[in-house]
């Protein structure tokens, strides 16, 4: 693991890391409290297509978890996003289109990303300020495309916020197969008028989750219009299962 | 208004009232803080079929609102329930069957209950310890059968918790007609495996609500299995729009 950069603001230490896995580097951001040595559980934050590990809402959720909920947080760039791109993720539209093409054509896409996430979790949990064992997962839309298989595969995931996704798209069979293997408590978010992934297919995915402790929160509006209320509810939900 | 009885426990004053309207009496319970003279907004609590104004979950919600959320609360018996019955509501199954028969046969049922609620609201808001103007509404299942038309008709209703009901049953046309007239913020609860009112019809009702500020919380389980989490969320939601 290589620390490339570090900034501290309002009690939150943000480190830009590269995690090495099988000869490639996974670009990551890690948020921990400044000057607090005690280990805290970590939440893995998966961004949506066209975004990156450092887009505004990811950083905002991370900082909220650290400042108000007793947790730490880590984000990595999705495939063809952020620092995995030549232009470092400044062109969201290009990343979105490249992702759509890869999602359709690359059978290894999900397993590669799950392996990147697990290597990242191993790396940050080796730090004294990050607790080993139980962790959280938060990922909407593309964050669920990878987060759902990750939650199904990784027993350390003890709580997850998923959503803005259905049993739909090029890997819908994978979602249908993996959903029953998700057993942790889940908060599942739906946008009632989602124009990318129809709510009926999101209902299918919610239904298929193996978790007995699950709830759906749905709001009117389009795919990207998740209200602030659910970012707050996400943080409270994650903390209620991890903190303290 | 006649006060028939009063008990105080753990800071909550519970009064058994009869509200007079057009020659009949509406049996009610009112919960306010003990020894606090300041006026507080009131939440109208509508119980479900087979229950009553004094069933456990109604009393628990009322006490939570008073003790922890700076509100007051009032409940009345539904038609053929509680103190409107000869045996004073001790036979829930009989009340359920009588209600089902009345719901199918009595065209005046909803308007009568809405009028009873509005008279009750007038009566309790005339007390110095209850604030006039904006109030809340909480009612699931039969509590929504009457609460939805009440929220549509009564401009003082500034926030509502509804659910466990759909555009279904003998008065489904009434729900379809009234739902667009509900404009206040709404929390709408759905039980995913509701055996009495199917979730698809609940989705129709959620869709039809005129409120732009609405959210649905859905949980696995049958009609009567609403988890404690949503009772807590209800109280927080009501208080966030009424208290302070």
Image (tube, coloured by chain):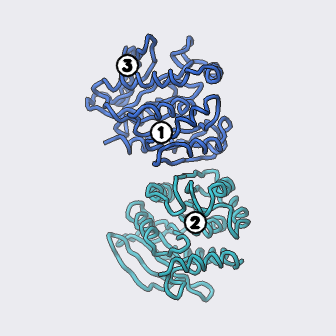
Chain colours: A cyan, B blue
Q: Secondary structure at mark 1?
A: loop
Chain letter of disc 1 in the image: B
Density class for disc 3 (Cα within 10 Å; few <14, some 14-19, many ≥20) is: few
Q: CA distance from mark 1 to mark 3?
A: 34 Å
Chain letter of disc 2 in the image: A
> Disc 1, disc 2: CB below 8 Å?
no
Task: Determine which residue is flagged by label 2.
Answer: A141
Task: Determine which residue is flagged by label 3.
Answer: B6
Q: Secondary structure at mark 2?
A: loop
| x then y, percent, for residue B6 | 37, 19
Task: Determine which residue is flagged by label 1.
Answer: B182
Image height check: is B146 above or below A161?
A: above
> Disc 1, disc 3: CB below 8 Å?
no
Q: Nearer the viewer, residue A95 or A117?
A: A95
Q: Nearer the viewer, residue A165 or B110?
A: B110
Q: Could you say which quadrant of the image residue B200 lies in?
A: top right
| x then y, percent, for residue B154 | 42, 31
Closer to us: mark 2 or mark 3? 2
Image height check: is B110 above or below A87?
A: above
Density class for disc 2 (Cα within 10 Å; few <14, some 14-19, many ≥20) is: many
Report whether residue A183 is seen.
Answer: no
């Amino acid at each position: 693991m290589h620390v490339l950069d570090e900034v501290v603001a309002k009690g939150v230490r943000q480190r830009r890391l590269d995690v090495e896995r099988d000869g490639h580097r996974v670009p990551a951001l890690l948020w921990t409290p400044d000057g607090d040595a005690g280990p805290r559980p970590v939440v893995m934050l998966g961004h949506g297509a066209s975004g990156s590990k450092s887009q505004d809402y990811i950083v905002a959720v991370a900082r909220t978890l650290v400042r108000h909920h007793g947790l730490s947080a880590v984000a990595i760039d999705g495939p063809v996003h952020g620092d995995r791109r030549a232009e470092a993720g400044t062109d969201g539209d290009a990343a979105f289109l490249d992702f759509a093409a890869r999602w359709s054509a690359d059978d290894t896409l999900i397993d590669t990303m799950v392996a990147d996430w697990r290597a990242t979790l191993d790396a940050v949990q080796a730090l004294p300020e990050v607790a080993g064992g139980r962790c959280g997962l938060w990922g909407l839309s593309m964050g669920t495309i990878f987060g759902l298989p990750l939650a199904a595969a990784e027993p350390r995931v003890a709580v997850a916020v998923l959503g803005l996704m259905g049993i739909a798209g090029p890997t819908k069979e994978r979602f249908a197969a993996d959903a029953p293997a998700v057993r942790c408590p889940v908060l599942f978010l739906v946008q009632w008028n989602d124009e990318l992934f129809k709510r009926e297919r999101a209902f299918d995915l919610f239904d298929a989750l193996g978790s007995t402790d699950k709830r759906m929160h749905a709001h009117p509006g389009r795919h990207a219009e998740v209200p602030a209320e659910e970012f707050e509810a996400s943080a409270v939900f994650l903390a209620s299962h991890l903190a303290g």
